[in-house]
Amino acid sequence: MSIHLRAHAFAANPLRGLSASTAVSPSAAADALRSLLDSGAGADVAQPHLSKILPFRRGRPLARSQDPPPPPPAAAPPPVSSSPAAAAPPPVAWRLAWLPPARVPGVPSDAFVFLGAHGEEEGKEAAAYWAVDVSEGEGARVGGAGDGSAFVDLRTLMVATDWRDKDAMGDLAIAGHARALLEWHSTAKFCGSCGSRAVPAEAGRRKQCSNESCKKRIYPRVDPPGESLEEAVRRETWEETGIEVGEVIYHSSQPWPVGPSTMPCQLMVGFFAYAKSMEIHVDKKELEDAQWHSREDVKKALTFAEYENAQRTNALKVNQICKGVEKGQSISADLNVESEEPAPMFVPGPYAIAHHLISSWAFEGAPKVPSSFSNL
């Protein structure tokens, strides 16, 4: 079961491309939004584009289930048919619930973070997109007012996303980028040079020290590991498995805004590495287990996991949350196998870069090392 995506989950943000970056300037978007908010957000204020707001509450974006189907019966589900012609349940899709500024009252203009824009196309008006945290204050009343929307955690949305749905994957990338920016704003409150308060600038895309004698510019960034990426791969592999690796070849990278609370916004970087030793010594503090597997074993494992079933189950969960009926299903419990024969291993779903590393190796083979290649 080889799944090939146009891009990894949380990547290929449609609001961050070259065409999107020139559709509406951040400064013009900020001026228009400020005018709307200052006028009470309900007045008929002329603006060159639409302003759309994505609220977040405790790291959860506001989502809406599209064309929600009736809830499934309480009886046990019928057994899964092995026939390819068996009727599959209708797909349940979700989308981000964008709101007009009038629906987000009582929030100061500098709390909004500019995400990007879409230009005029197919008769659609240009629009500027914003994210804002409404966890506290008057903004806490935003969303979830019986309109089929609810604040849903990003990990559930990640699994619920149909990876063949380009628009849904785009919404997931936007939500991930928005959460990362809001998380950065909530933690980068002070200047690292002089300790003065850092204030938002350039429509929330950066911060600046409020101290007139400092005025340091502060940008979001991915912390460097203090070593080359190739060195990090070799060190981590040796420390956790006792396996020495030589050549390291880059595969791809993936934004990962659903990490633990201590590191909520990370960048996953995937590599292939050639082993120089075969004996395994697992560091139990870091890994539960490590084993060698043949390519055939890996292919077999990839055909066992029912990724589509997991996606449908979580999409239905999003639907239930938006309707106010959350059953608290466990995501891991939704990943069942297609037969009673135990799978040789568990492979993460297609939303994770690990899946594509494993699938690429299993079905396409290891990349060839150029004759002049050296990163030792």
Image (cartoon, rainbow, N blue to C red):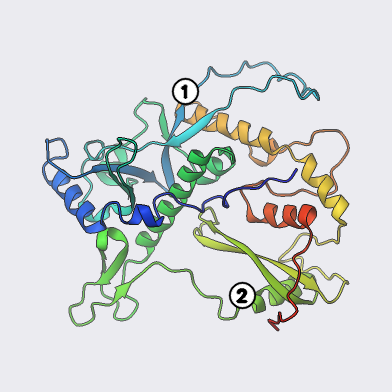
Q: Residue at x 52, y 62 (%)?
A: 266
Q: Relative to 238, does residue 60 appear above or below in the rendering?
A: above
> Residue 332: x, y in percent?
68, 42
Sooner in the amino-acid sequence: mark 2 or mark 1? 1
What whole-number distance in Å separates the C-alpha atoms at marks 2 and 1?
45 Å
On screen, residue 339 versus residue 220, left or right, reads: right
The amino acid type found where label 2 is placed reads Leu
Q: Relative to 76, does residue 320 appear above or below in the rendering?
A: below
Q: Relative to 75, does residue 212 appear above or below in the rendering?
A: below
Label 2, on which residue? Answer: 229
Q: How many marks?
A: 2
For mark 1, give the secondary structure: loop
Q: Nearer the viewer, residue 375 or 281?
A: 375
For mark 2, give the secondary structure: helix
The amino acid type found where label 1 is placed reads Asp
Q: Residue at x 75, y 73 (%)?
A: 369
> Residue 101: x, y in percent?
23, 40
Q: Nearer the viewer, residue 289 or 113?
A: 113
Query: Toward which corner of the image does residue 368 lie, by quadrant?
Result: bottom right
Q: Are marks 2 and 1 in contact (CB under 8 Å)?
A: no
Tell me the quarter of the image containing the N terminus. top right
Q: Residue at x 85, y 69 (%)?
A: 280
Label 1, on which residue? Answer: 67
Numbered label attached to residue 313: none
Q: Residue at x 68, y 73 (%)?
A: 233
Q: Residues within 10 Å of mark 1 (few under 14, many from 20)?
A: few
Tell me the quarter of the image containing the C terminus. bottom right
On screen, residue 110 versus residue 259, left or right, reads: left
> Residue 139: x, y in percent?
28, 42
> Residue 144: x, y in percent?
37, 32
Query: Toward which corner of the image does residue 334 lie, by quadrant?
Result: top right
Q: Nearer the viewer, residue 181 or 374?
A: 374
